[in-house]
Image (cartoon, rainbow, N blue to C red):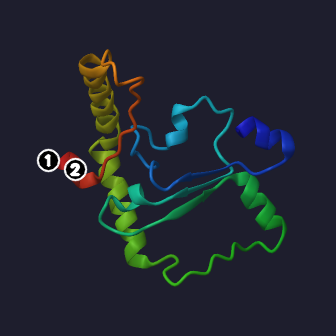
């Protein structure tokens, strides 16, 4: 899709609310794919709050920022809790825990192990055609 969007001059936008920020064993779910470049915009949510806080974010590429700067220079995103100080602080602390405790690596390793065990146990079952694993974590789940 990245190449199709580039070819037609469209923005490549990914919704990683459910699967981003480490929940697949990579910081961004799209990193599992062989993309020619990151998305132009990416929305994030659940992983940012670690299961503790209802948070969301939008990551915007330099390409998009440059267009905004060439125009009004502003990104108008008006919501009741935009840039909420407590929410932003919670997100920073959650990202720090994810990094310091190497939770993304743990998620990746546990997910790969689970996939292997599922394939070993159920891979030849007559009622199962394919085993593909998508794994998620909340920060507090990996502390136990």
Q: Secondary structure at mark 1?
A: loop
Residue 72, numbered circle:
none
Left/right of residue 108 with respect to residue 31 in the rendered view: left
Look at the picture and state if 121 lies above or below 11.
Answer: above
Q: Residue 19: image x %, image y %?
A: 45, 48
Choose top left, top right, bottom left or bottom right for residue 86: bottom left
Location of mark 1 (residue): 144
Look at the picture and state if 67 lies above or below 77.
Answer: above
Choose top left, top right, bottom left or bottom right for residue 1: top right
Left/right of residue 115 with respect to residue 13 in the rendered view: left
Q: Nearer the viewer, residue 125 or 101?
A: 125
Q: Residue 113: image x %, image y %?
A: 27, 26
Residue at the limit of the structure toward the bottom, as seen here: 80
Are the residues tagged 2 and 1 within 8 Å (C-beta)?
A: yes
Residue visible at 78% across and 66% down?
69
Q: Nearer the viewer, residue 32 or 82?
A: 32
Residue visible at 68% across and 77% down?
76
Location of mark 2 (residue): 141
């Amino acid at each position: 899709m990245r190449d199709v969007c580039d070819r037609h001059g469209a923005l490549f936008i990914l919704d990683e609310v459910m699967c981003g920020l480490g929940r697949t064993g990579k910081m961004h779910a799209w990193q599992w794919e062989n993309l020619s470049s990151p998305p132009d915009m990416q929305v994030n949510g659940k992983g940012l709050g670690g299961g503790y806080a209802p948070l969301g974010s939008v990551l915007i590429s330099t390409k998009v920022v440059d267009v905004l700067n060439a125009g009004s220079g502003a990104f108008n995103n008006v919501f009741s809790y935009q840039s909420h100080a407590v929410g932003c602080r919670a997100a920073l602390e959650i990202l720090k825990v994810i990094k310091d405790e190497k939770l993304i690596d743990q998620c990746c390793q546990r997910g790969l192990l689970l996939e292997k065990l599922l394939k070993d146990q159920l891979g030849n079952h007559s009622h199962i055609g394919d085993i593909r694993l998508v794994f998620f974590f909340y920060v507090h789940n990996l502390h136990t």
